[in-house]
Image (cartoon, coloured by chain):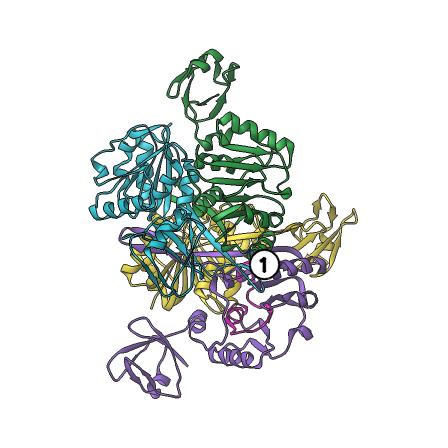
Chain colours: A cyan, B green, C yellow, D purple
Amino acid sequence: MKFVIDERGKKYILSDEIDFQSDLGIIKKEDIEKSDIGDNLITHLNKEFKVIKPNINDFIELMNRQCSILIQKDIGVVLAHTGIGSGDKVVDAGTGAGAILLHFGNVVGDSGMVYSYEIREDFAKIAKENIDSFGLTNIQIKNKDIKKGIDEENIDLVFLDLIKPYEIIEDAYESLKLGGWIAIYGVYLDGIQISHRILKKVGFKNISIVETLNREYEVRTHGIRPKTRMVGHSGYLLFARKL
Amino acid sequence: MKFVIDERGKKYILSDEIDFQSDLGIIKKEDIEKSDIGDNLITHLNKEFKVIKPNINDFIELMNRQCSILIQKDIGVVLAHTGIGSGDKVVDAGTGAGAILLHFGNVVGDSGMVYSYEIREDFAKIAKENIDSFGLTNIQIKNKDIKKGIDEENIDLVFLDLIKPYEIIEDAYESLKLGGWIAIYGVYLDGIQISHRILKKVGFKNISIVETLNREYEVRTHGIRPKTRMVGHSGYLLFARKL
Amino acid sequence: MKFVIDERGKKYILSDEIDFQSDLGIIKKEDIEKSDIGDNLITHLNKEFKVIKPNINDFIELMNRQCSILIQKDIGVVLAHTGIGSGDKVVDAGTGAGAILLHFGNVVGDSGMVYSYEIREDFAKIAKENIDSFGLTNIQIKNKDIKKGIDEENIDLVFLDLIKPYEIIEDAYESLKLGGWIAIYGVYLDGIQISHRILKKVGFKNISIVETLNREYEVRTHGIRPKTRMVGHSGYLLFARKL
Amino acid sequence: MKFVIDERGKKYILSDEIDFQSDLGIIKKEDIEKSDIGDNLITHLNKEFKVIKPNINDFIELMNRQCSILIQKDIGVVLAHTGIGSGDKVVDAGTGAGAILLHFGNVVGDSGMVYSYEIREDFAKIAKENIDSFGLTNIQIKNKDIKKGIDEENIDLVFLDLIKPYEIIEDAYESLKLGGWIAIYGVYLDGIQISHRILKKVGFKNISIVETLNREYEVRTHGIRPKTRMVGHSGYLLFARKL
């Protein structure tokens, strides 16, 4: 797999095993295989494609997905609020397309590990292919129902993006290490409110609920201004800690 | 150093070298030294302090600082947008109190490295002590003016929190690897606008400007609602990529 | 009653019937009585107080109140969304301190009328005094429970700021003219959601729910920026129309 | 002119002088002329159109316009912040399509007056037709350049929606009564910042800058949530007062 960008800034993932065809021309698979980061691949129409090292977001942008993904603004809040990092162990459910999962794998590194539960076989399969394709070896996709129990112990973060996250809260508490975090993503305040009550009952501390609004700005001739359109809502995040 | 939490949820950093004194009683240094994560330390007034493994945010909350720090909402945007992770190399300036710096160290892990430039000797010294105290070995504080040049090459992220970040943009471009990001934090749109122009001139791509609003919610008897007070502004973030 | 402003920008309501005393000196009641808008009243310490025509917000700022008031950002949404104006008839409940009530009186003018229901005698009394003091003659305070029924017909706007607004929705529908609006203010989404369901059941159209965030900016030496603190929440507004 | 709404909730303005044709059938001009508010007009296809009294927003929604209009959220802030109401005198420039102008006319009533300056003849003509059509008699459109001077005195509010509002600030100060407000709408902070400086220099008080974010909510089967899309930006409002 090689990650390239054309002269217009468009990104592509190229396979070493088939010739690449585009409106800017053809690149032979032999050329793709031999190329290194920083090289320029030239099409038969003499157009340049630059080989770059993809980062996690390039990959998420292009990867195969069959369901909606968590957006960057929410992923950022989870990373910063829980302080998850090198060497940490994370449990994630459900896997979905695996966007935040790839971010978890990216920050916990080789000394850490991410276990992701996904009840749907098709989603689990795609997520597994995506992870293999990106080359992360610290993520394990588990095609099973997290409601049946969490196998892992001494976890730093349990992240739940489920219809009924509150069913998992007790198990999450058991699986977390002292000081570990639970983070719950939900589109409706109603579900967040139920989870909040259960978190309290189970004994979690430092409970907080947050939503994030991101505004993008644009620079025009007359000055700088927020863009006319923005994302009005993705979801709420509920955090709590085992202390 | 041990990180403990009392029965009210208040956090403390305890030194192994001196007895700890608080309104809940005294803990002897010998007891502190012998304690492990998960243990309870008991004061002479019979109050419990639980020993936990601090995460990065616990540490930032308690660490010594003489200037304002980047807040979580902005740190999260930087982490998620640039996709910085295990094995990456980061250049940071100015160090300040080192809050985002610790987060960088936390996610790049042992295979990564963070170089932080700070012109003020006092700030550099405190930041160094903080990093040593937390035990991160992948961060190097450089007490020099980044305007004099960036020594490192092949960098994944250059993060600038400076009065005049636009003076560093050309050097940042040189030091970045292909596909690397620059992220600039600024309190005023005026400075962001100047930097935006320079980024374009120097040849950066994927330029975007974002500000984040975080709303916290609280659960009361009558239901759930946003908190009355919120942070109206911290700063703007400007991102661009070498492609 | 005269409305004055001192040299520091501080505002006062002066009575014609008693001498005015302040840290800037005394003004005799005879002088207050004789003064006109634009005049300067001079204290015995030779300090100037300028007599101005108060607008509705000056008055709300200084008036006697024993409960919290609707803030400008929410009053503005009600005025703009319902398009209430000259000659319109408004029903309001509960009166509370009467801030939005005064705005209603201000925009419907002499050809319009506002009827305000308040169950608490003490609140009704203060609101009545406030209205008389400001000189509006198109507002009638009714010290009765709106749950017992709305006496008025052919109303342009029914505005409800009550604990259980949904109990009034059927009666509101009856009292409204064709094309008239109902506006409900609520601090929690839970109550808004119940009202939303009832509005639909009763046959209201053009139902919408809105919350407003106001950000203030400040100009400093280095540029312009949002203020650090902002109001994170006051309440939600639910609008619907009889069509 | 009659304002009607069909069975689907769609709104129309009907002329008394021509037959009305739609996909739901034809209504004869004689029927239109005879109809009163609350009547149902029946098409030759037996479809009902209800005659209602349009409010200001119905009219703005349907009126002829050749340029963008101020949106409700910003109109609301102007109305609430300046407290403009019955009997007040307003100067407005430029007229544009006249949306906020109609709101001003609506709240100042028969005892108030609105003077609107518009340099472009085509815009002035359309605005005049719109006002006549809605039936407001307290608005005077002036097809002249406000930079040449403001003819009116003793004004309660000067509202400016111009490219270079700062050129008018001195004249605005002269034309305002003591206690009167100036309100400036601008898309870019850059222009707002210049105006802010001039306002201060000219002697205005109570200067404030505000932007408003409106979030709409929707009720779904699973609960209530903010809509996915929202308006990220319309403009900033700058207020100041002559005191």
Residue B226 point in image, percent of width and height: 43, 45
The amino acid sitting under disc 1 is Leu
Left or right, A91 with respect to B94, comes to left
Side of C133 where D230 appears, left or right: left
Q: Is residue A225 magenta?
A: no
- Mark 1 neighbour density, 10 Å: few (under 14) some (14–19) many (20 or more): many
In-front residue for pair C148/B183 = B183
The percent position of residue D11, horizontal first and vertical second, equals: 36, 74
Q: Position of residue C98 (x, y in %)?
A: 49, 53
Classify the position of the N terminus of chain D by image quarter: bottom left
> Which residue is the site of mark 1?
D189
**Magenta range:** D79-108
Element at badge 1? helix
Q: Is residue D97 magenta?
A: yes
Q: Is residue A136 left or right of residue B119?
A: left
Q: Residue at x 47, y 64 (%)?
A: D72
Closer to the camera in the image, D18 or B79: B79
In the image: residue C17, left or right of residue D211: right
